[in-house]
Image: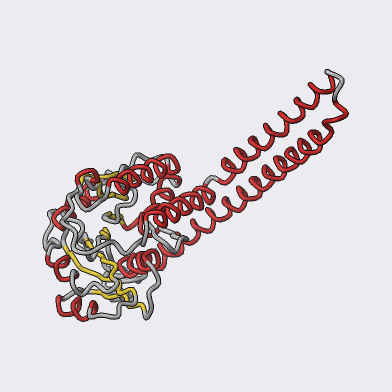
Amino acid sequence: MVLKRQVERQVKLIIQIPCYNEEKTLKIALDALPKHIDGIDEIEYLIINDGSSDETERIAREWGVHYIVHFKRNLGLAKGFLAGLDLALRNGADIIVNTDADNQYCGEDIEKLVRPILNKEADIVIGERPIDEIQHFSYVKKKLQHFGSWVVQKASRTDIPDAPSGFRAYSRHAAMRMNVHNEYTYTLETIVQAGRNKMAITSVPVRTNPELRESRLFHSMWGYVKKSMLTILRTFLMYKPLSVFTALSILFGIIGAFLCIRYLVFVVQGTGGGHVQSVIVAVLFIIIAVQTFMMGLQADIISANRRLLEDVQFRIKKMELALLNPDGTKKEEEESPKD
């Protein structure tokens, strides 16, 4: 008879930090991280070295981080985030917190992030920064941050007030379900994904520290707006394509109908012969409306298939991780003495 040894599971938190040339600020950020949180049995630390050319990795090793994801070249924030989640899951993390290497966020507030997960109130917790009180944010940036969060709220059907915040916590279940297709950033897409998949997501107020360096995520305000809007649009199309294409179809259909009515008015007035072009344009818009709606139906079918594939991926990942020990090694069944 084969028996599996039953071991009481402890709660492990892994704090991950994406890094790209952070030798000047990484130690400051690491020193501020909590060493103990009530309800957490074990805290470990992980960095994602995203192709750094400085001494970032050496500083992390000397400080004593437990895990390092090493990229030979810079792959971007989104890929680093997913790689960190995967390594944390493989090493038994029950909760994963993501923070920044520039010490933007107050390390003590990690306890606030994990508390709703420990209390089984949420699977994802986003740190809400006091945006209007951050001195190094310009007036325009503050307004854009609020506008971007509002758009994400509408797209995701959530009430997260600070969508761009990278200070967040994930339960093990939520981390296994994360899929990021955008190469720019994960912050907006994961909220829309969580909202559309009806995952339990909430936010808690957090504090920020004085700026140690300028943001490297975007080089201009216009670039930030453009990339953020494209990310939201692409994510929304992935999860609600039929709604988007139906709205466009109705718009084209209304224009076509207006042109048809306009032509009929001219016919009644006896001057329809000089406005035949209105009929041609009207038919063109109606054809576009029909084709757009058909594209929406096809995109909706593709979206449904993608959701099925994501569910299969989640189940496979869950089974794969179930075969690993908390330290990432493969489990081996132990045989008890036979009767």
65 or 228, nearer to the observer: 228
Image height check: is 37 above or below 154? Answer: below
Q: Quadrant of the N terminus?
A: bottom left
Location of residue 198 (image quadrant): top left
Image height check: is 277 above or below 298? Answer: above
- Is residue 335 shown to the viewer in this render? no
Residue 97: percent from left, percent from top: 25, 59
Location of residue 13 (image quadrant): bottom left
Image height check: is 115 above or below 83? Answer: above
- Is residue 70 shown to the viewer in this render? yes
Image height check: is 316 above or below 226? Answer: below
220 or 237, nearer to the observer: 220
| Residue in the picture at 57% in, 50% down | 304
Q: Is residue 110 left or right of residue 232?
A: left
| Residue in the picture at 46% in, 64% down | 316
| Residue in the picture at 84% in, 22% down | 267
| Residue in the picture at 69% in, 35% down | 253
Q: Quadrant of the C terminus?
A: bottom left
